[in-house]
Image (cartoon, rainbow, N blue to C red):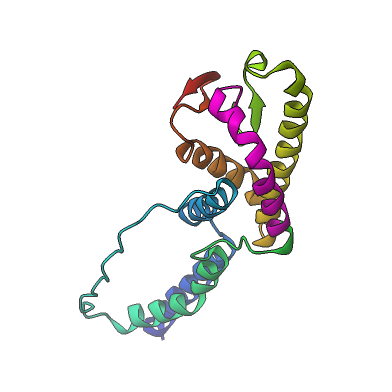
Amino acid sequence: MRKVVLPCKLALACLLFAACVTINVYFPAAAAEKAADQIIDQVTGSSPATTSKTPPQTRSAPAPQTLLRTVAAAILESLVPAAHAQGGANLDVDSPEVRAITASMTQRFQQLEKYFASGAAGYTADGLVEVRDQGAVPLPERAAVKRLVAEENTDRAALYGAIAKANGHPEWEADIRQTFARRWVARAKPGWYYQDGGAWKQK
């Protein structure tokens, strides 16, 4: 009897462990970067970078397993995919709210681009935009630039929250914001300014 009880306890332990795994969904950083690049390219009108395809991976034959390991693996296989499904290989950036915000940002970027190019505006470390050098803006345009920057920051803040909500994880908003902050800089044109370590730097 004792020999039967031990495998049952181990199988139950595996089941409980797998159930915990389904609850603990980690932020999908790679998927977030891909989503950020997609939106940034749309807003800025940039062409997505060409990426090489990863060759398909071949699986080696599994090593022989004991009956207990096979049972435990089957239990995990049936439960753990729920966590992967929640994390997802991609983030949903196609909700009506995300599309509306992206369209608004795309239209505004045509007006903001010249201020990024002149160094008057730059990207902040928290995924927003800031007037970096007001002196680089002609006096008649200063009020308009401030308005554009304020509207852009409102849309950006709304965008990060909308993406998090669209994917069922509002708690991801801060991570999405930080991901976008990095990707805005990475995809900025040479000569544009961005904040790093509390200081403005030129790309």
Judge whether 11 appears above or below 29 on screen. below
- Is 119 one of the magenta-colored residues? yes
Query: In which quadrant of the rendered image does the N terminus lie?
Result: bottom left
Q: Quadrant of residue 136?
A: top right
Horizontal arrangement in the rendering, residue 53 relative to residue 193 (left or right)? left
Q: Main secondary structure of the magenta part?
A: helix
Is residue 114 visible in the rendered image? The answer is yes
Is 103 left, or right, of 123 in this rendering? right
**Residue 165 image offset from top left, x and y in percent:** 70, 57
Residue 105 position within the rendered picture, expressed as x and y whole percent measured from the top left? 68, 46
In the image, which residues are magenta?
Answer: 98-121
Q: Is residue 5 left or right of residue 70?
A: right
The residue that appears at 31% across and 64% down in the rendered structure is: 53
Examine the structure image and report whether residue 160 is included in the region drawn in magenta.
no
Residue 99 in the image, given as x and y percentages of width and height: 68, 59
Foreground pick, 63 / 182: 182
Q: Is residue 113 above or below residue 138?
A: below
Residue 116 vertical position relative to residue 81 in the rendered view, above or below: above
User: Quadrant of residue 133 in the image?
Assistant: top right
Residue at image location 57% in from the left, 67% down from the top? 86
Name the residue: 40% across, 52% down: 49
Q: Residue at x 79, y 24 (%)?
A: 143
Foreground of the two, 102 or 167? 102
Residue 96: quadrant of the picture: bottom right
